[in-house]
Amino acid sequence: MWERHPGLGWSLGIFISSALLAYAAFPPFNVGEAAYVFALPAVLWAYKKPSFRLFAWTVLAAQAVAWTSLLGWLHHTSWVGMLLLGPFIGVLIGLWYLAAWWTVPRLQGQQAMVRLIGMLGLAALWVVLEWVRGWLFGGFPWLPLAASQWQRPLVLQIASYAGAGAVSFVLVMFNLGGAAYVHRIFFEGATGLRKRSPEFMLALMLLVFTSFPLLAEVLGQQRRPLVRATLVQPYIPQGEKWDRARATEILRTIERVTFAAAANASDLIVWPEAVTPWALFRDPNVQPWIESISKRTGRPLLLGSISVGQAGTADEQWFNGAFVVDPVKGLLLPGYAKRKLVPFGEYIPLRPVFGWLSKFVPIGGDFQRGVSARPLAVPVGRGRTIQVGLLICYEDNFPALARESAFEGAELLAVLTNNAWFGEGGAAYQHAAHSVLRAIETRRPVLRCGNGGWSGWIDEFGYIRATLTGDNGSVYFRGAETVEITRDLRWRDRPSFYTQHGDWFLAVCAVLATFVYYIVLTLRPPLPRSAGETVF
């Protein structure tokens, strides 16, 4: 069969390798090196000019399998959501592979400069499609390619100038250059100096010049203490979290874990997203209870909480946000309201069409969006306050939100999240990878506190300084820990280039991808080459 249909052998090999490499590049496997070759097999196959139907079915199926597997933790909330979202993202990514199928054969035999421009256009298209993924249906920019490098911060430093998309651009270029190099060696019969591939040399130069020149920024740090924070991870099971019959027990658990950790000297106690089983301002007991905790510990409290309207009003709008409690002054208003809501979790998009679908957060009606990125002033003793920019739940997936908080004067970004919805798989690690990107983009330390999952802090250069784990070494546990967060004095009052200028690189990529499309569209087939001639 393979002799009669040689394309099937390629198809099977590309399907297996593409799916495995895409899956392995991200948590929970964390084989970041796979991101340098994840697309190489499929691009190499494009040089062979396979039929569109066979190529399309192969790459689309491979990406659908890979992304359904990566998002497998969604089955804890919705099997339907997992089985729809995984293939949908796979198809979006598969569109890039189809663009490679169309572009790569047209570049063969062209002059080196034309081929290089074509490769740059394909890398730019990847960045644009990642943005599209974050924009469609309310946004799900989960795991951009740059997130695969979350444990390898050196290659991420360019994000402080051009955003995480620039890292994805470099990685895709390395895949394209690698495929061109492999094709030249094994399928063009090149030997000696003729093996040189301009595409690979350009990709290698991009990798080097976007990483090593920024090493001086990483090595020249002048770190000073910013705040000592006690991170409380109560790990309330989701099946109990909204059960009113268990509310008193939940409050006792939070108290017990908090007071056990309060013996350690710290400036601040931090609780995760929606920590109380009742909504602030709706239930009259919530505010006195959280104020009593702050008063008895003698520490300010930064907590995530669902709230209904404002104190003393009849406003019935629901918000998911964060508040600061002073041990002397009590609850400080206003708080922070979440700006990016979870589709089908906190609201139903296109409710007239999808209103029959229920949210997995059992709150009546839809949550309302916050509009302000203003940091919260958190007292940390001796008359000193720090400006904390808040990101609730998966808001750290969105670069613009962290950038707005930093632009408004945040000294520290705090991600208050739940993460207990999704079992004890790779979801918490996948989520934490985005905080690494936000820290580098804004050059601000990031503190993370989850109900269950990845809690700790990350410095301005993406290095993980502390991760909370239980006795068994797992991030899924009930407990607390005090961490000392420091900052680099060079960035104390200085915004990063990305904070100042935003997604300029995305605009460049959109223009470049469009330009290259029209260039390739007008290319004529190359003239036949004489024997032994190589077009460099």
Image (spheres, rainbow, N blue to C red):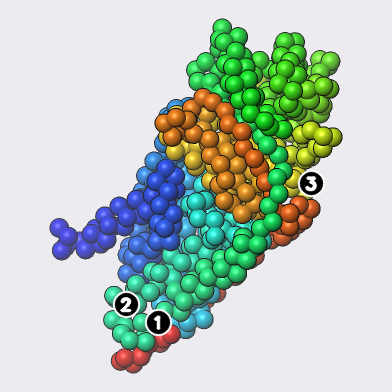
- Quadrant of the snapshot with the C terminus: bottom left
Residue 500 lies, in percent from the top left, at 75, 57
Q: Would you say 389 lies left or right of 206 here?
A: right
Q: Nearer the viewer, residue 370 or 231?
A: 231
Instruction: Report crowding for label 3: few under 14, some 14 to 19, many 20 or more residues within 10 A (C-alpha).
Output: some
- What is the CA distance from the residue labelled 1 to the residue labelled 3? 49 Å
Please provide percent x and percent y for residue 427.
Answer: 48, 37
Q: Kindly indicate whether the residue at mark 3 contacts the one at mark 1 (C-beta within 8 angstroms).
A: no
Q: Which mark is residue 503?
A: none
Residue 124, quarter of picture: bottom right
Which amino acid type corresponds to the residue marked 3 in the rendered image?
A: Gly
Helix, strand, or loop for circle 1?
loop
Alpha-carbon distance for marks 3 and 2?
Answer: 53 Å
Which of pointers 3 and 2 indicates the residue nearer the eye? 3
| Picture layout, residue 514 above or below residue 322 | below
The image shows residue 54, relative to residue 27, as above or below, that is below
Can the viewer see residue 363 in this picture? no
Provide the residue designation for mark 3. 409
Q: What number is the disc on residue 196? A: 1
Q: Amino acid at mark 1?
A: Arg
167 versus 361 height, above or below: below
Please give the name of the residue rendered at 15% of the width and 58% of the height, measured from the top-left corner. Answer: 1
Residue drawn at x 67%, y 30% is: 265
Residue position marked by numbered label 2 in the rendering: 185
Secondary structure type for disc 2 = helix
Q: Give residue 361's position: percent from left, percent from top.
A: 58, 23
Nearest the viewer among 269 and 4 is 269
The type of residue carrying mark 2 is Ile
Mark 1 to mark 2: distance in Å? 9 Å
